[in-house]
Image (tube, rainbow, N blue to C red):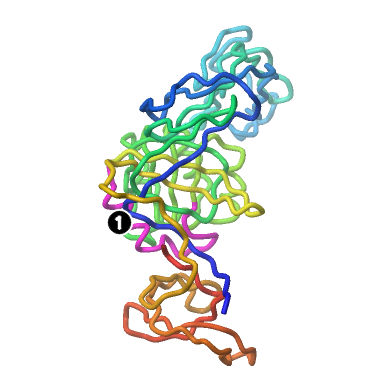
Amino acid sequence: MKLFYRSTIVQTQTKIRRERVLPKGGEIVVRVGQEVSPIQVVARTTMATDFAILSAAEKLEVAPEALAEYLQVEKGASVEAGAVLASRKRLLGKRQVVSPVDGIFFDVVNGRIAIQPTSDWLEMRALVSGRIVSYIGDRGVMIETSGSLIQAAWGSGQEGAGKLMLVSSTPSALLTPDQLGGDVTGKLLVIGYLNSVELFHRAEDLGVRGLIVGSTTAELCQASRSSPLPLIVTDGIDANGMLPPIFDLLQQANGRSASLFGRYNAAIGQRPEIILPQAATLGLDATTVKQNLTLGQLVRILGTTQAARVGTIKHIYQRLQPTPIGVKTYGVDVELADGQLLFVPIANLDIII
């Protein structure tokens, strides 16, 4: 019996290899066998210096004609990546517009700021600490590391690295304004549930390097797509919070360095990842997806009234079983933490590897 099911990797210790590849051929600036840090450039290529256009008035929530009074930089001035171009004080802090590149403050037109880049190099950084094991033509490298690996459900497409900071005390705790203070600058925040676009932008303004949330809203996912702040959603678009095994692993890693690979492409099965490098264990192998369901496997229930609950497989049915809606399907019995035993169709299982 060949069954297909969803799986999610939540590994405390495994061997990990990841590619870092340029969009086109260029120059590799590291050697095979070299140890690299997350911020180290591993490859670079020349790029067209198109203007960076920033919707500043929209970001500050002011009329285009009022933008001038909030500008922090004069026309023609040189700016560095990360420099504050415009700023407006708000009740919950400042709303800022920062330059995404080194360049020249070229002009302001209809509430938009134009930055002319001065750098003609596109640099690919390692993003994760590890060792270079091979080249990928003239476009990039393969990096090997070891540590914890968590597959997420959704990512905004941005990448980042920094120290983990656990903000939520429980897997389902909602982020509140008082939890975003000055101590979050430069950190990767771990949050059970985030439902405020305003707090997302406040984290951005405070210099947070990334957000790892259990669950969030569709509105916030949409807002994050146009932000440089990486957002990783481990579970889904709901209010259920974070899967306890994922929360427990991140809680144990509080204060450690982590890397966020935020790219998501459902069409090719690419999922966002959280990697927490640490010293290798002797004989460590890369994680592989199990081909068959087995008794005792940890699973998460999807798409039913029991959605997001976690349990273990107690029985695997080899024949089609009737369901309350009159359809027969393959499934398993799952025992929840409270001892309750549920029949769950295979299609509603997420196997935690």
The percent position of residue 280, horizontal first and vertical second, equals 28, 43
146 relative position to 122: left or right: left
Instruction: Place residue 1 in its image quadrant.
Output: bottom right
Which residue position is annotated with label 1? 169
Q: Nearer the viewer, residue 97 or 14?
A: 14
Instruction: Place residue 126 in its image quadrant.
Output: top left
132 relative position to 136: left or right: left
Q: Is residue 240 magenta?
A: yes
Q: Report the number of numbered marks.
A: 1
* Neighbours of disc 1 within 10 Å: few (<14), some (14-19), many (20+): few
Circle 1 — which element? loop
Q: Nearer the viewer, residue 231 or 339?
A: 339
The percent position of residue 44, horizontal first and vertical second, equals 56, 20
Which stretch appears magenta?
A: 233-255
Q: Amino acid at mark 1?
A: Ser
283 relative position to 122: left or right: left
**On screen, 311 above or below 256?**
below
The percent position of residue 297, horizontal first and vertical second, equals 39, 72
**On screen, 83 above or below 134?**
above
Q: Is residue 289 magenta?
A: no
The percent position of residue 225, horizontal first and vertical second, equals 60, 42
Q: Nearer the viewer, residue 43 or 51?
A: 43
76 relative position to 260: left or right: right
Quadrant in which the C terminus is drawn: bottom left
Residue at horizontal 58%, vertical 75%?
Answer: 2
Instruction: Place residue 211 in its image quadrant.
Output: top left
Residue at horizontal 57%, vertical 42%?
Answer: 157
Residue at horizontal 37%, vertical 35%?
Answer: 162
**On screen, 237 above or below 27?**
below
